[in-house]
Amino acid sequence: MRIPCEKTTFLLLCMIMTNLIMVGGYKSTFSINQDATDILLDNSLYQSAPRDSFTIMSLFLDGDILTINITYGGGCEDHIFRLIGSNEYLASSPAQTYVLLSHDANNDSCEALLWETLEFNLVPLAWKYQEFHKADSETIRIHIIGGLENVTINYTFTLNETTITNNQITNIEVWPFLLSLAFFGALKRNSKKECFA
């Protein structure tokens, strides 16, 4: 029995679309909050960044995303918040590090009480720790300074082939899709009306 090219082409297109959906689904499984700002790792900036007043009302850690609810006085200028790591770790169990929640009030003289929710991605901190300590899984005790009171959290991470870095996903299994494209290219080069036995 010989299968017409038109039907074979249709079947291959279905295969390609299926693989596209599979790859897309795999990708979305590891997507992160695109609104979260990466933690900055810079010793010099950690020492020199602005430290205007604010209060941490609450915070929680969901995977690699740290959410911090804060209040501060202002209302007339833009306020800039950055989470900055020192790149230094205390030799303890668990390992400990200090990060600065920097607040630049831009000399705002207004006194309205403002509330804001900040979101930070801690993955760069995990990668930097792994770079120096060669540990793919670890708990780090993070001391957050900069507000009226210091806060401490425990951040547990696991780095593997699907860890997200720089808002991209590494090691996505796209070989089924590429294989389908190769077959489709070979089919287009075949000029006969009947392709396969």
Image: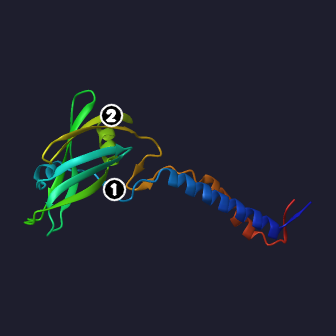
Q: Where is 65 relative to 8, above or below?
A: above
Q: Which residue is label 1 attached to? A: 36
Using residue 14 as the reference point, say whether residue 35 is left or right of it: left
Of the numbered discs in the image, which one, if any, rests on residue 139? 2
Q: Quadrant of the C terminus?
A: bottom right
Which label's residue is closer to the chain start, 2 or 1? 1
Identify the residue shown where x is 81% and y is 67%: 7
Identify the residue shown where x is 39% and y is 59%: 34
Q: As rendered, which of 120 and 151 lies closer to the eye?
A: 151
Q: As rendered, which of 111 and 157 lies closer to the eye?
A: 111
Q: Residues within 10 Å of mark 1 (few under 14, many from 20)?
A: some
The amino acid at mark 2 is: Thr
Q: Label 2: state its secondary structure.
A: strand
Location of residue 87 by image quarter: top left
Identify the residue shown where x is 13% and y is 54%: 49
The residue at the far front in this view is 112
